[in-house]
Image (cartoon, rainbow, N blue to C red):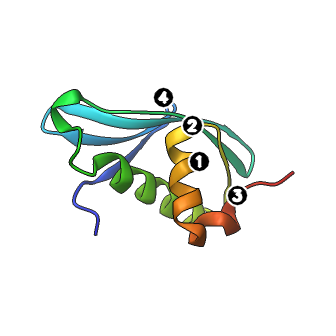
């Protein structure tokens, strides 16, 4: 269940959660219908609370809704998809 509101910050090219003034984010590069997820980061004060997993699931859900294929260049996102094979269908294999 998503506790935080996902924002697609197209100016900074990243998906974000606002955590009471701090930011957790996944940076991306988007080309046509493919989105490359390059880096996940969040504040140390929120580590160990499942924020990265919640953010990753929200980003993958948004990509699926938009009909995007995903390239997981970020090691966290790649491991998340490996651990949750239901997301394999949106991974770009080109």
Q: Is residue 75 left or right of residue 73?
A: left
Q: CA distance from mark 3 to mark 1?
A: 10 Å
Residue 44 drawn above or below residue 36:
above
Residue depicted at x 73% and y 52%: 33
Circle 4: element type: loop
Q: 76 or 70: which is nearer to us?
A: 76
Q: Earlier in the sequence, mark 4 or mark 1?
A: 4
Q: 76 or 20: which is nearer to us?
A: 76
Q: Earlier in the sequence, mark 2 or mark 4?
A: 4
- Give the residue pinned by disc 1: 78
Q: Could you classify mark 3 by the number of other residues whose Cα lies within 10 Å: few (under 14), some (14-19), or many (20 or more)?
A: some
Q: Earlier in the sequence, mark 3 or mark 1?
A: 1
**Looking at this rendering, what residue extends furthest in the left direction?**
20
Is any atom of residue 41 visible in this view? yes
Q: What label does residue 11 carry, if any?
A: 4
- Give the residue pinned by disc 3: 91
Residue 64 drawn above or below residue 56:
below
Q: CA distance from mark 4 to mark 3?
A: 24 Å
Q: Where residue 67 sits in the image (x, y, percent)?
A: 66, 64
Circle 1: element type: helix
Q: Where residue 15 sits in the image (x, y, percent)?
A: 43, 42
Q: Which dot, 4 or 1, sits closer to the camera?
A: 1
Q: Is residue 18 left or right of residue 66?
A: left
Confirm or deny contact between disc 1 and disc 2 (CB under 8 A).
Answer: yes
Q: Determine the image quadrant of residue 45.
A: top left
Circle 3: element type: loop
Residue depicted at x 27% and y 52%: 50
- Give the residue pinned by disc 2: 74
């Amino acid at each position: 269940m998503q506790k935080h509101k996902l924002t697609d910050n197209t100016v900074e090219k990243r998906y974000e959660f606002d955590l009471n003034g701090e930011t957790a984010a996944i940076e991306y590069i988007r080309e046509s219908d493919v989105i490359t997820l390059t880096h996940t980061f969040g504040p140390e004060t929120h580590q160990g609370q499942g924020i990265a997993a919640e953010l990753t699931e929200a980003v993958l859900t948004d990509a699926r809704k938009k009909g995007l294929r995903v390239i997981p260049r970020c090691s966290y996102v790649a491991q998340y998809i490996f651990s949750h094979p239901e997301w394999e269908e949106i991974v770009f294999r080109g």
